[in-house]
Image (tube, grey):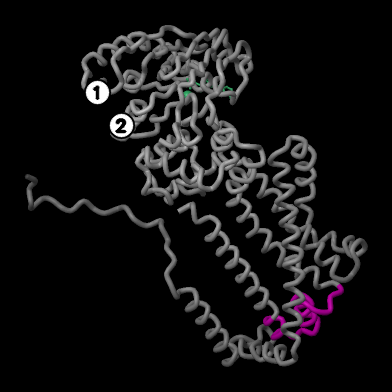
Amino acid sequence: MSDPVNRKKVPFRGGGFKPRPIRFVAPFVFLALVLFWEFGSRTGIISNLVLPAPSEAFQAFLDLYNSGLFWKHVSTSLYRLVFGWSIGTALGILVGLLIGLFSLARSSLLPLTSAFFPIPKIALLPLFIIWFGIGEGSKVATILFGTFFPTVIATYGGVDNVERGLVRMGQSFGMSWLSIVRKIILPGALPAILSGARISASIAIILLVAAEMIGAEYGIGAYVLMAGSLFATDQLIVGVAMLSILGLCVSWLIGKAEKALLNWRG
Amino acid sequence: MPFPIIRLDYMQISIEKLSHAYGSVEVLNDINLTFEPGEIAVIIGPSGCGKSTLLRLMGGLEEPSKGAAYIAGQAPEGSLNPLTYIFQDFALLPWRTVAGNISLVLEDHKLSKQQSKAIIDDVLARTNLSEFHDALPHQLSGGMKQRVAIARALAVSPAFLLMDEPLSALDSQTRELLMDDLVALWSREAFSACYVTHNLAEAVRLGHKVIVLSRRPGKVREVVEISIPLNERRERAAELEEVQQQLWHMMREEALAADRELADV
Ligand SMILES: Nc1ncnc2c1ncn2[C@@H]1O[C@H](COP(=O)(O)OP(=O)(O)O)[C@@H](O)[C@H]1O
Ligand SMILES: [Mg+2]
């Protein structure tokens, strides 16, 4: 038995380094920020020239909504986004698979992909306008190209990372090549493809705005550009908030898709 | 039994003058072996001596540099995959349930839904896994995962099982349980197998004959026959211990030398 007088508890030194999400903190912080902002604007701490009050921005939103143009802008942008992103992603997955599966495709397409990936697609916008016209074509093409390359890279990386042991298992059971690709390689690459989709979706939103700033009548980007050129900062804030909400929605959707498709990860 | 699994329609595997090298590294040197139907042949040898390579060559997953492995006789009728592996790391698809993993290897064959279901239910029953039908691999212990892999192998009615250290990833208690399972499976219906391990206790519990390979380049150093019936081996531990000692004497020098070689690299 140890001496009960001279003993002390072993000091605890574990724990920590494991942040966990706490519910309701995020909305609370957001609300507090907006309230502080509003308070600052009303008391004059924040000059109206520097930043309009949230209530003014909200009024600008109501004006936009009542003018009937809100849905026009949003639906035009959504159309370009969905169209460009889904084609770009589909083609990207296809080419990524080819690079992941065939030596010839890897030797020919991978260097091309690596060369084209770092080019900011916005720089190519004038070319796209010449090729695809000033209308929808150039805008969809910008988003399409912008999402294509990151998807290619995510997909072939995912294919490369599929456990070789699983492929060998498929072969050892005499599975056909197509079955191995469909049932082992594709599902195995899915986590990487989905995280690629997350990245390409945010790239798509950035490119959407950039593309809509040239020769677009409608769309969130056009609205933001117009507000900016008139120094209508309240409208500018409405446009920026719409983009932020759009981004949150996309990431929420991809989160849902990950939950549904990758539930086997436990 | 509606689906007899492992048939002894006398398909025999033999290896003749087989050598294999990876680049300049000679891994296997002039291997000559014959595997008898209905027998479990255990291959032991120091790590890195080419046991896994030999098994891959036997199952056609790699091509030997010299010599060949031969199959004599027809694959038994109804065998969907005559040479079937059981892997050390189980190789289960994590996104498929237990039943889905077994169904995977049946889907490329022309089987009706009922036939597939009957096979799956039958092999799950035989490996005591029926209640885990819908479980995902990440919910299972290592022992359970390997049972699923065994069930999957049985589902294709193999003529010959190729097992590469199937119990090496498991703790020793689970290993004991699975050895009992394998003995029970073999006793119910004798199957032919080549079982690779570095564990001498497994070798003497499961092997009708034990093939001792030398260190790299692997050569057949000795073949030891063990005549004690598999289902009596647990009781006759003393006799087995003797065989195990004998094997250890053969392995010791090789293992020691192999160990030093690796340290030199
Ligand atoms: N695909 C490969 N390419 C090159 N060397 C290999 C390959 N596979 C195995 N080897 C080498 O061959 C030797 C035997 O390997 P292996 O058959 O896995 O041994 P064991 O299973 O007996 O431990 C080892 O030295 C290993 O490094
Ligand atoms: Mg090995």
The percent position of residue B98, horizontal first and vertical second, equals 45, 46
Query: Which residue is nearer to you in this view: A68 or B158?
Result: B158
Lateral position of residue A105 relative to residue A201, left or right: right
Is residue A158 among the parts visible in the rendering?
no
What chain does mark 1 sit on? B
* Mark drawn on residue B234: 1
Which residue shows up at 41% across the image and 37% down it? B146
Q: Is residue A219 above or below residue B60?
A: below
Q: Is residue B143 above or below residue B41?
A: below
The percent position of residue B173, horizontal first and vertical second, equals 28, 34
Quadrant hosting residue B127: top left
Marks 1 and 2, how far apart at CA: 15 Å
Q: What stretch of residues is rendered in magenta?
A: A215-238
Quadrant hosting residue A110: top right
Name, please, the residue furthest toward the right: A130
Q: Amino acid at mark 1?
A: Arg
